Every structure is written in C-alpha cells, then in structure tokens.
Amino acid sequence: QVQLVESGGGLVQPGGSLRLSCAASGSGFTMGWYRQAPGKQRELVASINSGGATNYADSVKGRFIISRDNTKNTAYLQMNSLKPEDTAVYYCNAYWGGMSSWGQGTQVTVSS
C-alpha cells in the first residue's frame, strides 16, 4: 500500500496563492489532486503521469499547475488566483495498474 502525506493547505484571501505537496512512499505512479466541497462529489483537479504529462479540470486551467519531483517522490499543486469556489478539502491520489491510494486530505479555504 502506498502512503501519501499531504501538506500546504490553509486559509487564503481571494486572488492569493497556495502550494500543496504530496509525498509518496514509492515511485512511478500517476499522481493526482482531487477536491471535495461540502455537499458535492469529489472531482479531479489535475493529474500528472510518471512521464510528466498533465491534465487539468477546465475550472482550474491557467490558474493551477501540477508538477512532480521524482527524486523526492513528491507531487505539487501550485494554486494561483484562488477563488472562493476553490474552497474544498484537497486529496492527493496515486494510481498504478488499476490500484489507487489516497492521502488524508488538506483543507483549502478561500475567503476574505
């Protein structure tokens, strides 16, 4: 089982930035960030495969950047121009060969 440890959430004003980190206990996975707002389903925010190819939800394109450091087995989500509707619990996910692991989640709140 892959262990994922997230960090970097918090409270930020609209228009601000945050960077989330996800440290994995292994390597070679597709890494993704998902989010879940109260009363809503969990949704994919962004993903990056082991080769560096990325995918983004339309709602975050141009504002969020997903990246990874394979030497540290860590994925990052740089979130810029944050909006109140970005408020959610953000979860890191690792996917490999039909299997998946989740982090514990980190709260991101965008509010003035």
Image: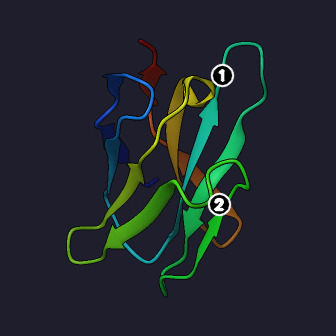
The residue nearer to you, when weighing 30 against 78, is 78
For marks 2 and 1 on the same chain, the one whose residue lies earlier in the sequence: 1
Query: What residue sits 66% from the left and 73% below the top?
Result: 97
Read off the residue under disc 1.
37
Q: Is residue 34 above or below residue 95?
A: above
Q: Is residue 32 left or right of residue 69?
A: right
Q: CA distance from mark 2 to mark 1?
A: 24 Å
The image quarter containing residue 20 is top left
- State the image coordinates of residue 29 (x, y, percent, origin top left): 50, 71
Query: What residue sits 68% from the left and 49% below the top?
Result: 44
Q: Is residue 38 left or right of residue 23?
A: right
Query: What residue sits 37% from the left and 73% below the top?
Result: 27
Indicate the amino acid at tag 2. Met
The residue nearer to you, when weighing 109 against 111, is 111
Read off the residue under disc 2.
99
The residue nearer to you, when weighing 111 against 69, is 111
The image quarter containing residue 85 is top right
Q: How is the image coloured?
A: rainbow
- State the image coordinates of residue 90 (x, y, percent, origin top left): 51, 35
Q: Is residue 33 above or below residue 11?
A: below
Is label 2 in a helix, a strand or a loop? strand
- State the image coordinates of residue 10 (x, y, percent, origin top left): 33, 23
Q: Is residue 85 above or below residue 32?
A: above
